[in-house]
Amino acid sequence: MTGSEPDPGRAALDEAVAVVRAHARIAPGCGIVLGSGLGGLAEEIEAEAVVPYRTIPHFPVPTAEGHAGELVLGRLEERPVAALRGRAHLYEGYTAREVVFPVRLLAALGTSALILSNAAGALNPAFRRGDLMLLTDHINFTGTNPLVGPNDDRLGPRFPDMSQVYDASLRRLAEAAARADRTPLRAGVYAGVMGPSYETPAEIRMLRAFGADAVGMSTVLEAIAARHAGMRVLGIAAITNAAAGGEGTLSHQDVLAAAAAVGPRFVSLVRRIVRDLPGDGDVGRVPRRTRQDA
């Protein structure tokens, strides 16, 4: 196959879109991916439909605790939204393309602004458990990329630009929302790793040397797929622990508990961000810049 031939996965995507639209005809200008322990925001949505992932063809079903596995379609702050309550991860055995299938579904449903959230470990020594961090950039240490393989130009360009993954205008909007909400908001670079084991002290020193402020096991692949599709992306991390045992032995239960504790501030911030989005949450798609070189 050449780089511009149709991706066989497009048929699977079309099938999934048809099933979701049978539940709700809403066109969600804003999409929200809810990470570990942050699913409570979905309860704030005036739902038109709640669709279990297992009922959507080809949709990856999370196995990790803290990921409910539901697509919620409705209105938040009177804006049409779609919230993914939980996500799939590479460490569960899914491929990179399977991990980003939900993001591509949101794009196909009409989403133009995507808010990605996650629970992350702090690398920056100034960060504390319970902080919220705005992603300014990321480092892909997962060892893979969802765009590997044949490219379908209907999904996005062969060589998408990644110089501004996390949209500057959305970051400014989030910062203004945080000030209005009196919510402290950090900013930094997120390092995405495969997992599921937590990082060793040597790995933490390496990630810090590379300029990362927080580390987690999600988000970067979704952000790449979203930019490939022309969506504007905003990333918010809930700092749930100091990486590599800075606060003692790490456990997933502690991460979930910390995310739940920061949940109310996260919900309040995202509600204000969604409310302040231009139009119906459609902040416009970024023109795609391509290169002819490989």
Image (cartoon, rainbow, N blue to C red):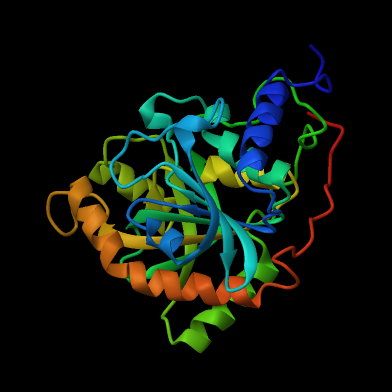
Q: Where is residue 79 in the image (x, y as percent from the top left)?
A: 64, 68
Q: Which residue is drawn at 26% across and 67% down?
A: 261
Q: Residue at x 48, y 36 (%)?
A: 53
Q: Which residue is drawn at 83% across and 19% down?
A: 5
Observer-nearest residue: 196 or 62?
Answer: 62
71 w.r.t. 14: above or below: below
Residue 17 in view in this figure = yes
Q: Where is residue 17 in the image (x, y as percent from the top left)?
A: 67, 36
Q: In which quarter of the image is the C terminus?
A: top right
Taking the image as shown, residue 278 lies to the left or right of residue 123, namely: right
Taking the image as shown, residue 257 lies to the left or right of residue 146, namely: left
Q: Where is residue 115 in the image (x, y as percent from the top left)?
A: 56, 58
Observer-nearest residue: 11 or 235?
Answer: 11
Q: In which quarter of the image is the N terminus?
A: top right
Q: Where is residue 187 in the image (x, y as percent from the top left)?
A: 49, 69
Check the image and name the residue furthest to the right.
Answer: 292
111 w.r.t. 183: above or below: above
Check the image and name the residue furthest to the left.
Answer: 248
Observer-nearest residue: 64 or 144?
Answer: 64
The quadrant in which residue 199 appears is top left
Residue 60 in view in this figure = no
25 w.r.t. 197: above or below: below
